[in-house]
Image (spheres, rainbow, N blue to C red):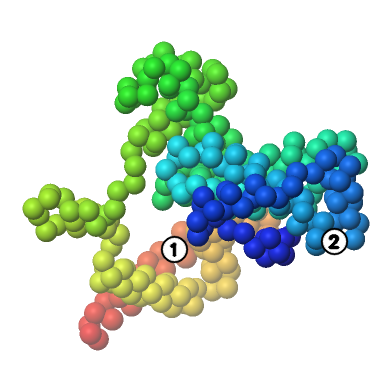
Amino acid sequence: MAQVARQIDLSPDQNLSRYLQKIRSFPMLDADEEVALARRWQEHEDQDAADRLVSSHLRLVAKIAMGFRGYGLPVADLISEGNVGMMQAVNRFDPDRGFRLSTYAMWWIRAAIHEYILHSWSLVKMGTTASQKKLFFNLRRLKGTLQALDAGDLAPENVSIIAKQLNVPEKDVVSMNQRLAGPDHSLNTPVREEGEGEWQDWLEDKRDNQETVYGHGEELDRRRSLLVGAMDRLSERERHIIVERRLKDSPATLQDLSQEYGISRERVRQIEVRAFEKLQKSVKNAAIQQQYVC
């Protein structure tokens, strides 16, 4: 369907008024023409048929896009996104279902514009769930109905009314109202008009600095090396029992190991304790030797 846009060769980006005037020149289609063109595209991928279907509905796209001007985004961009939805609608339209293309296409047009607004209105993603999207596109209207457009934080009774009308949780109403009330601000904004500092200068990086990270990594490697060396000094059975009992996320039980080696659970416990004491002694001696060498 990308070819449709190239064939029509119309974009609202350059001159919106000229674009709106131009799309009025495309003829409207009657029901029979629409079905015939849709079948030509569906069955034969006739590019001219697809172009005519899209171009005859560009006025519908513009009308729907105009309804979303209140979000502060360029109307030309809204129309462009709506045109993408229109092309998707033509691509999926089934003429044999008995309804007009305009009825089907309006949902695709609105969906495309909705997605564009949600991704462009704020640097922070505004709506990811169905309830959030519903709130984003209806909260202002409902606040106007309740005469609470300039109320800042909504009163509890208004939160309850909006939540019931939209069938969403009250906490989502409060959260979306706060997010819509606070526009994005650049981190490069000066803290004071006469000051030189910016807001980003006050951000604290709570991560460890590179020196600390490097030091922790070195210490971890050293301890791992000491442990590996100490494990080599254990017998095969001692090493296996220590690994199974001390070094696994899901340690083996004394019963499991007693059955594996044919010994009592108490004997397994004694071997584990003795092996662990050997490890501690070996690691301690190796660490002292490293310090002495250094």
Q: Position of residue 136 (x, y in %)?
A: 49, 34
As drawn, the label of residue 276 is: 1
Q: Name the residue rendered at 74%, 47% in the picture.
A: 27
Cα separation, mark 2 vs mark 1, equals 78 Å
Task: Name the residue furthest bottom.
Answer: 293
Q: Quadrant of residue 150?
A: top left
Image location of residue 57, percent across then percent down: 70, 46
Q: Residue at x 80, y 38 (%)?
A: 100
Q: Which label's residue is closer to the chain start, 2 or 1?
A: 2
Residue located beneath label 2 in the image: 46
What residue appears at the point 57 percent right and 48 percent down from the top-left corner?
A: 20
Residue 124 in sight here: no
Instruction: Give left or right: position of 179 versus 7.
Output: left
Q: Amino acid at mark 1?
A: Phe
Q: Nearer the viewer, residue 81 or 244?
A: 81
Q: Nearer the viewer, residue 82 or 248?
A: 82
Classify 135 as above or below 262.
above
User: In which quadrant is the N terminus drawn?
Assistant: bottom right
Looking at the rendered structure, the secondary structure element under dot 2 is loop
Asked whether, in this view, residue 6 is left or right of residue 97, the answer is: left
Circle 2/circle 1 CB separation < 8 Å: no
Q: Amino acid at mark 2?
A: Asp
Q: Please provide percent x and percent y for residue 38.
A: 85, 50
Badge 2 crowding class, 10 Å Cα cut-off, few under 14, some 14 to 19, many 20 or more, is some
- Vertical order, 119 against 13 (above or below): above
Q: Nearer the viewer, residue 249 or 199?
A: 199
User: Which residue reaches farthest top?
Assistant: 157
